[in-house]
Every structure is written in structure tokens, then in C-alpha cells.
Image: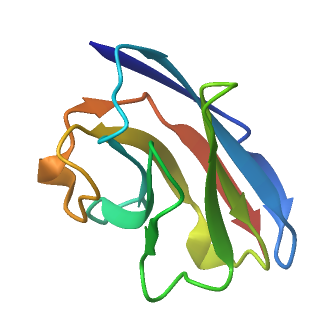
Amino acid sequence: QVQLVESGGGLVQAGGSLRLSCAVSGRTFSSYGMGWFRQAPGKEREFVAVISWGGDRTLYSDSLKGRFTISGDKAKNTVYLQMNSLKPEDTAVYYCAADSGGLGLGQEMYDFWGQGTQVTVSS
């Protein structure tokens, strides 16, 4: 089992930045992909980014690449999502997830999920 706990969400003005953290515990392997998803009110959950737990390979949503950066610190068992130039449309619950199969893009590929952290961007 893998446990994931997100933190770092909150209220920020448009143009601001936030860094989300995901504390990882339990049995993980270098082959895992650690991803971030988000779900806005009334919308489906969407892929944000994923990083290989054993290295630095990353994949991003095309629409978010350039503003969001995913990183991982295995020594601290933490995955980060740095979000810059935030927009009101970035308002969502952000979820951390683990894919035992690698760098999944679809939520159906992820085996473990955190509870989510709310990010609200005011205009």
C-alpha cells in the first residue's frame, strides 16, 4: 500500500504562485510514476503532470507546461508541484496519485490517491 498526503493548497491572487507537496509513504518502487491531477467544480478530473519516482523523467499537460513544474525528492519522500502565474481557471482540488505501471496520463492508470488539497485563485 502507498499513502499520499497533499498539502500546500490555499487562496492566492491571480498571477501568484503556490507549491503543493505530496508526502509519500508505504512501499514504492523506482518504476512508479507520481502524478498530479486536478478537478474543478463541475468538471472531470484532469491530468496535470507526472514524474518517474526513480528518476527525473516528466510529462505535462500541454496546456499547463511552462507554468507548472513537477519535482520529486526521494530522500524526503515528497513530490512537489510548483505552480506559477496562477489563473482563476486553475481553481480546483489538486490530487497526488501513484501509478505502479509508470508514467500514466489517464487517471484510470493510477492505483493510489491522496485526499486532495484545495487551490483557489481569485481574480
> Quadrant location of the C terminus?
bottom right
- Left or right for 3, reference 94: left
| Place of residue 61 in the rendered image (x, y in percent of width and height, measured from the top left) | 42, 78
The residue under the point 26% across, 12% down is 1
| Badge count | 0
The residue lying toward the viewer, choosing from 31 and 64, is 31
Residue 107 drawn at (x, y percent): 21, 53
Report whether 59 appears left or right of 98: right
Q: Residue furthest left?
A: 108
| Whole-percent x, y for residue 106 in the image | 19, 62
Residue 87 is left or right of residue 65, and the answer is: right
Residue drawn at the location 36% of the way across and 40% of the way down: 97
Q: Is 79 rendered above or below residue 25?
A: below
Q: Is residue 123 above or below residue 78?
A: below
Identified at 21% across, 43% down, the residue is: 110
Residue 114's place in the image compared with 69, above or below, is: above
Q: Toward the viewer: 79 or 123?
A: 79
Q: Quadrant of residue 6?
A: top right
Nearer to me, 9 or 20: 20
Instruction: Specify how the rendered protein is coloured.
Output: rainbow
Q: Please, is residue 3 above or below residue 105 in the view?
A: above
Quarter assignment of residue 60: bottom left
Give coordinates of residue 27: x percent, y percent: 34, 14
